[in-house]
Image: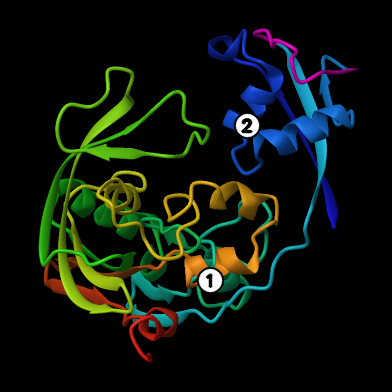
Amino acid sequence: MRIETKKFVVAEEYAGQRLDVYLTERFGKFSRNEWQKRIDEGAIRINGHVARSSRKIRAGDALEFSYSMRDEPEVDTQITILHEDADFLIVNKPPGLPVHPSGIYKTRTVTTVLAETGVLAEPYLLHRLDRETSGVLALAKNRKAAARFQKILRSGQTEKYYKVAVEGDFPEHLNATGFIYRLPESKLPRQRFYKEGNVPPNAIEVQHCRTLFTREKRHNSISLLSVRLYTGRMHQIRATLSCSGFPVVGDKLYGVDAGLHFRFADNQLTESDWQRLRIDRCALHCFALILPHPMTGAPWRLEAPLPVDMQRLFTGP
């Protein structure tokens, strides 16, 4: 275990909130009950003084708290190279491996592993995948190549395809065109919602989105889908599927039980919870990127095979 300390100043927009509510929204990895417990133990200080959960925070308040962090988890760091040339390195990211240092992960990330093993001394990440998502990840070897790749992305010339396993008997096709948005009252600030028609009047950060889903197979009450991503919104695939009634297998935030995220954050998932999840990560895989090569203009298809853990979901009894 290691101790980390955070210090920050409350912004004007949060003035008047209860301390426990503010901390839950700002740091969603801990539940409100967990924050209240930490506050009661005197772990949170405002302007140098121990605070209470009901304390209303003010703009300019200086908050400080220390907390113990688990040692960095063991994760699969076997990064497979799919393509390499003078300007780019394309890899197959294993599930569970973050793309860059963040939170509890400091050394076991794509960028640090590539640098420490001498594969790529200065990797330029060209897009991101969530820690639990596997598949195609593109990196540039220099600034010029990175800039050209980003220009291709912005121009709309890139086709993005995913594979995802979902709960339920999914229809053959679904063209999900609508809006992704947040709700201020949501207990999880990172959580997004999807709706085809008019969004709720209190919705914020509303963005248009389009995703095309095609069912590939069904097995044991779950479906494997091929996904064409036309827009790239935060949690677009997961939120769209959850709000359409087909949560992603293994998803703790948008999954079969709204309480899974908090129990996972508090390290309280039961054996029954894990059985309902079916798999220890969100069953989402970046299958392919198709674009013109940024340096040559030639057609470029980057593809990563479906990982073993997702294959196993569709085999056996």
Quadrant in the picture for the N terminus: bottom right
Residue pictured at 69% horizontal, 67% vertical: 73
Q: Secondary structure at mark 1?
A: helix
Residue pictured at 45% horizontal, 57% vertical: 130
Q: Secondary structure at mark 2?
A: helix
Residue pictured at 49% horizontal, 72% vertical: 279
Residue extent of the magenta highlight? 49-60
Q: Report if the CB atoms under discs 1 and 2 are less than 8 Å apart.
A: no
The residue that disc 2 covers is 24
Looking at the rendered structure, the kind of residue marked 1 is: Gln
Q: Position of residue 138 (x, y in %)?
A: 35, 66
Q: As displayed, is residue 144 above or below residue 139?
A: above
Residue neighbourhood size for the residue with mark 1, other residues' Cα within 10 Å, grouped as few (<14), some (14–19), many (≥20): few
Per the model, the C-alpha gap separating discs 1 and 2 is 28 Å
Residue 275 disc label: 1
**Would residue 282 be found to the left or right of residue 14 on screen?**
left
Q: Position of residue 28 (x, y in %)?
A: 59, 38
Which residue is at the far bottom? 316
Q: Position of residue 292 (x, y in %)?
A: 14, 65
**Would residue 26 be found to the left or right of residue 231 on screen?**
right
Looking at the rendered structure, the kind of residue marked 2 is: Thr
Q: Position of residue 182 (x, y in %)?
A: 37, 31
- For the residues carrying marks 1 and 2, which lies nearer the camera in this image? 1
Q: As displayed, is residue 214 above or below residue 190?
A: below
